Each structure stands twice: as structure tokens, then as C-alpha cells.
Image: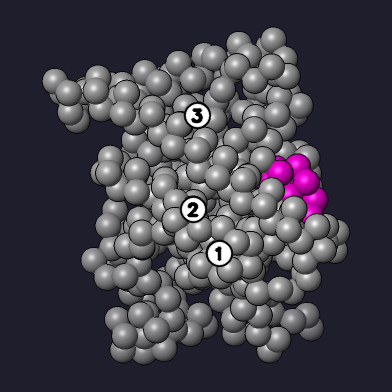
Amino acid sequence: MGSPVSIRKCTICQRKASGNNYGSFSCDACKMFFRRTIILDLQFRCVKKQCCFDSESWSNYFKQPLVSSDLTEDSKLPHCKSCRFHKCLETGMFIKPSVLLKMSCRNEDTMESIIGQLLYLDSRRSTILMTKFSFENPRLEEIVKRRKMEIVAQKILIFSDASYKMNDEDWRFFGMFTTVEFLLNLDFMEELEISDQMILLKSFAAKATLLFTSARTIREKHDRIKTPGGHEIVPDVLSTLFNVSLNFLSRIRSLLVNKLIELNITNEEFLLVTVILFSDPAISTLSPNGVSIITARRASYTSALFQYCQLTHQQTGHTRFMDLLSLCHVVNKNIEDIQSLTTICLVIIGCNIDHNANIHSWVQCKCTQASTSREADLDAHIRDKV
């Protein structure tokens, strides 16, 4: 007599499920919830701390432990739609923007459609950054060609027998990886040749990472860029080690952050500015076809930002629009300062710094030829731009 067939559970709500939906093993209810949320561009807010589906919160809510085998189709579940949506993202659900447009029958160039896509991609980026990790060492070209990577949950790292705590180097790598994924999933990227995608990413991925890091810093109520683990990206110790002024270090870690605070920039404005700066058709090595595609998409993004500024600022909309675009100068200056610090480090230590030295990994990467680093390949393709 054969063994009974095991019943697989939905990775979101733990009810019975029978197949993969949008990249995650899930039940039909969660599949339709995710699809409806994306297509209708629904926005939810958690009144707690975005942890309603965590085991502790679940236990407090139902006055019983979270045991998957105890759940049935009739079991009560948390009513928080925001946490349910983030759980969908966390378990791997994803609908590409190009597919989403066909499903929703929307015009890709409307302001609402563009902003909706960007908010969706950014929500996915930040969720993956804060809940997932990978020990793999992909090259940029492998990421662009969509080589499947093994992604694990950060909770598994913490609670496994061989407990692993992500260090600054890990955060830096995964921050860059999730940024590249965000940019790759912009709808127009599918239309470009691999070579043009690589050119765009090499040109802007480091700047985009700096932008996303600065925006997260503001959300976390800090005045200087830090890793998600809470560590300084450019610590004061560099002043003593490399004989540079504290004012210079302070400018590196706070210049862009202070500008974003001064502008009181909204998430919609921030994302539109980021993709406008990314879609740069003036890069000389782009193919003619690539230039044509990128020019058209930048025009759509720029139009969406201008409409948004007019809608939210009305008579001062044009001034607001120009102020937002001026962020490009601040980003470039911040990158130039980082490059200057890198040069100083290289001159003083001659690229012979101990790989385990107590210097933050962002600068450390520039001061070492550690080919054994898990980030070496990705650094070689992108981070020389920092």
C-alpha cells in the first residue's frame, strides 16, 4: 500500500495549495489577491509594524502558535492586506511590468501606469533586500541573462544550526544586486540588446544604489548613509587612517541624504527621477536602436514627472520639476567624492590592505585586490564606477 500523498501548503497563508502562481507555491486565493492588488494598483498600510504574518505576531493575534499543520481552509488568518501583499513578494511572487500592461489593458505611458509600475518594482526590491540573501557570486552578465540564483530567507540564516549574520560586505553586495534587479525589470529593458543593458547598468547601477541607500536612510530617520545592518558606510576612522578631513567624510555620507531631506521628496518623485537619470541616451557606446528606445522611454518618464509636479504643486510645478532634476548634480558630486576617497586610499596603502581590516567594505573594496571576495566579479563590472 502506497504512502499517503503529502498535502503542500500555500507559502503565504499556509492553506492547501496545488501549484505555482507567479513564481510562488500558493493557493488560488493568494494568487488572485496578488493579481488584483497589482492590476488595480491598490495601496495598503499596516497599522502595526509590517509583521502580521510573523510567527510571534500570528501567535499573539490568534492566541495560539503558528503551526502549519493545524491550519485548515476554514482557519482565521490575519486581515492585514499590506502584510499579506509583502508576504507574496517575500515568497517570490512577481509579474513583469510588460506582462502586467497586457493583463490590465493599460496604456504604458500614462502617469498613473508609470508610477504604479515603479512603486511595485520598488516594493519588491526593498522586500527582497530586507528579507532575502544569496551566497552566490554572479557576474553582471549572468544577472542580465537571468541566470537563476539560489535565494534564501534571512530568517533561515539567523535560526539555522550554523547561524550566519550578514556583514557589511554582504549588505553592500545584496544592495547592489537588488538595485540591478530593479533596473532590469523596467519594461523597456526587455527591448534592448544585452550589450545595451550592460552599458546602462555599468553607467548607473552604482549611482542608483547610492540613491536607494540614501532614501532608505531617510526612512530610518538617519542623517547619514548606513547599511541595512545599521553600520556606517564611511566611518570616522577613515579620517585617521587616510589623513582626510572629517568634513570631507561627512559630505560623502550626508550630501545626497541632506538634499533629499531639503526637497522633502516623495517616493513617487524619487523613483521617477531615478529612472530618468538611468535612461540616458547620451552614452556614446549605445547602439542606434538602443538610443532610440531609451530616448522614447526617458521622454515618458520625464513627462510623468512633470505631470506629477503640476498635479501636486500646481503653479510652482515647473520649479519643483527643475529642482528634482537638479538631483543629478548632487549624485554626481557624491560619486566624485567617493572616487576621490578611493584614490587617496589606493595611494596611501598601495592596494595591500588586509581583507579583514576594520574598514567599511564599500571603501575596502576599492583598496583591495581580493579576488577571493564573493563580490569581486560584480565589483569589476559595476563598482569601479563608484
- Residue nearest the viewer, comparing 50 with 249: 249
- Main SS, magenta residues: helix
- Mark 1: few/some/many CA within 10 Å (<14, 14-19, 20+): some
Residue where numbered disc 2 is placed: 248
Q: Residue at x 27, y 57 (%)?
A: 45
Amino acid of disc 3:
Leu
The residue most toward the left is 315
Residue where numbered disc 1 is placed: 239
**Relative to 242, does residue 44 appear above or below in the rendering?**
above
Question: Which stretch is magenta?
Answer: 373-384
State which tag comes first along the sequence, 1 or 3. 1
- Residue nearest the viewer, comparing 225 with 93: 225
Q: Is residue 380 magenta?
A: yes
Could you tell me which quadrant the N terminus lies in? bottom right
Q: Residue at x 31, y 85 (%)?
A: 60
Whether residue 310 is visible, yes or no, is yes
Q: Residue at x 59, y 17 (%)?
A: 281
Residue where numbered disc 3 is placed: 277
Tag shown at residue 168: none
